[in-house]
């Protein structure tokens, strides 16, 4: 083709998770433990609010930042749940999922040559967005520090080109959460530098060991913290595409322009469904968490009984065991587990090179599915041991 495409677009790749998922159909009957979305239906009342909105012809554009009623619901939710204060008028934007929120934020703050520090292993959705802005990701290896960023290591990576640090806790893929004292230690580093903290806390409602600690809680960092959130995980609403950005007006007035030209607004019926989720269905994540905790405990127990090293996850719905001792790359391990063992789980390398040697298992599946998956994994690793 003689027409030239955008080189930055040509350079990015389809995500490693998707690449691996594309292999699954060729192994019929495989137990699929790869999916990163809740296995529960969207709550009934939320579905009703969405369908009623359609019936009542609430199907035209809303304000670019989202319907005021929804922004007020977002405001109250974050105030009540996390003690955060953001104005509905100019500090909250409703987006098409956290994904569009992240894109709008990065495009607002990043310029050619900027650097974004990203603790890794990490969700593969960030780096391409950063690269499309002509900026570069600098990884902070957390694989030796319990998958949590070490403040000293972070400090050492900061240069005059560092524009932002992205923090995703509870984490996809590791399921790790941060405690207040750990956030405090990082706060000291952030206070010393002129950079943005982009906090993707989409799993904040899915914490199992106590209340979620948010990076947005520090008054001293308020002007540089941008919180990205959404209902995909908390209310099993991945397909409704509702996300939120909360941040200081000085930044948000510019994010709004990017979002406006990209999206105009988030889907209006979905916004009405979101109101219901945030106003009357706040109890839903805690109900789902009961199931996640039972499943996590089961999978953790089975993995440790198999002699597999694994960090106990305290949030999200992933577990990230080490498969290093089997002497295969994580990709080869995952492919053989799929083809020979009949279980699909995402190779750690899909979450950057710092995920190499690990496997991401999603436990957003019913107990019988998880049991079958663990039985098959156990059989598979016993064949590997025999071959060794
Ligand atoms: C860490 C993280 N951030 C963002 C997203 C995207 O969420 P949304 O569905 O709101 O676009 C995901 C989805 O898996 C995720 O795991």
Image (cartoon, rainbow, N blue to C red):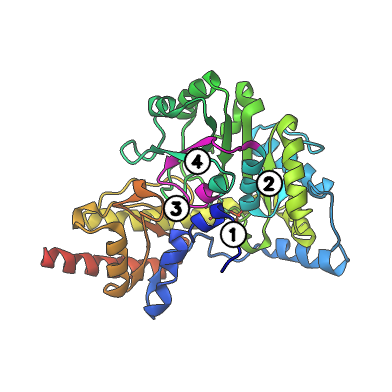
Q: Is residue 121 above or below residue 43?
A: above
Determine the residue located farthest toward the bottom in the rendered image: 28
Q: Magenta segment range?
A: 109-128
Q: Label 4 belongs to which residue?
A: 136
Kindly tell me whether residue 91 is visible in this rendering: no
First along the sequence among labels 2 and 4: 4
Q: Secondary structure at mark 4?
A: strand
Kindly tell me whether residue 86 is visible in this rendering: yes
Q: Label 3 belongs to which residue?
A: 293
At a point 61% along the width and 21% down the height, the residue shown is: 220
Q: Secondary structure at mark 3?
A: helix
Q: Are marks 1 and 2 in contact (CB under 8 Å)?
A: no
Q: Label 2 belongs to which residue?
A: 244
Residue 28 is one of the magenta-drawn residues: no
Q: Of the residues tagged 2 and 4, which is closer to the observer?
A: 4
Q: Secondary structure at mark 1?
A: loop
Residue 255 horizontal side relative to residue 193, left or right: right
Q: Label 1 belongs to which residue?
A: 5
Q: Of the residues tagged 1 and 2, which is closer to the observer?
A: 1
In the foreground, 101 or 262: 262
Q: Of the residues tagged 2 and 3, which is closer to the observer?
A: 2
Q: CA separation, marks 3 and 4?
A: 37 Å
Determine the residue located farthest toward the top in the rendered image: 192
Q: CA separation, marks 1 and 4?
A: 20 Å
Q: Is residue 295 above or below residue 129?
A: below
Q: Quadrant of residue 350?
A: bottom left
């Amino acid at each position: 083709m003689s027409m030239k495409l955008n080189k930055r677009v040509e350079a990015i790749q389809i995500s490693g998770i998707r690449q691996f998922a594309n292999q699954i159909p060729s192994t019929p009957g495989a137990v699929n433990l790869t999916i990163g979305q809740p296995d529960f239906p969207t709550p009934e009342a939320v579905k009703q609010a969405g369908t009623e909105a359609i019936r009542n012809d609430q199907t035209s554009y809303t304000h670019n930042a989202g319907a005021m009623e929804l922004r007020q619901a977002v405001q109250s939710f974050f105030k009540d749940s996390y003690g955060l204060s953001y104005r509905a008028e100019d500090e909250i934007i409703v987006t098409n999922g956290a994904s569009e929120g992240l894109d709008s934020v990065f495009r607002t703050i990043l310029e050619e040559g900027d650097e974004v520090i990203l603790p890794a292993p990490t969700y593969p959705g960030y780096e391409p967005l950063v690269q499309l802005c002509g900026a570069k990701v600098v990884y902070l290896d957390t694989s030796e520090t319990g998958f949590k960023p070490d403040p000293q290591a972070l400090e050492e990576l900061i240069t005059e080109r560092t524009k932002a640090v992205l923090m995703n806790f509870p984490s996809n893929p590791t399921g790790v959460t941060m405690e207040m004292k750990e956030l405090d230690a990082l706060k000291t580093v952030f206070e010393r530098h002129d950079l943005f903290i982009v906090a993707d806390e989409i799993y904040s409602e899915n914490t199992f060991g106590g209340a979620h600690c948010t990076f947005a809680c520090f008054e001293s960092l308020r002007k540089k913290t941008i919180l990205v959130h959404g209902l995909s995980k908390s209310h099993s609403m991945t397909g409704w595409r509702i996300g939120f950005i909360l941040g200081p007006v000085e930044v948000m007035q510019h994010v709004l322009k990017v979002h406006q030209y990209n999206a105009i607004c988030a889907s209006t019926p979905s916004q009405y469904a979101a109101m219901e989720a945030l106003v009357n269905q706040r109890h839903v994540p805690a109900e789902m968490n009961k199931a996640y905790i039972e499943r996590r405990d089961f999978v953790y127990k089975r993995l440790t009984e198999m002699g597999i090293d694994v960090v106990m996850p305290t949030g999200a719905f992933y577990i990230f065991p080490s498969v290093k001792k089997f002497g295969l790359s994580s990709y080869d391990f995952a492919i053989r587990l799929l083809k020979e063992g009949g279980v699909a789980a995402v190779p750690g390398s899909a979450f950057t090179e710092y995920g190499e040697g690990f496997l991401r298992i999603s436990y957003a599946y019913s107990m019988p599915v998880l049991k079958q998956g663990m039985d098959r994994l156990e059989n598979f690793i016993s064949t590997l041991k025999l071959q060794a």
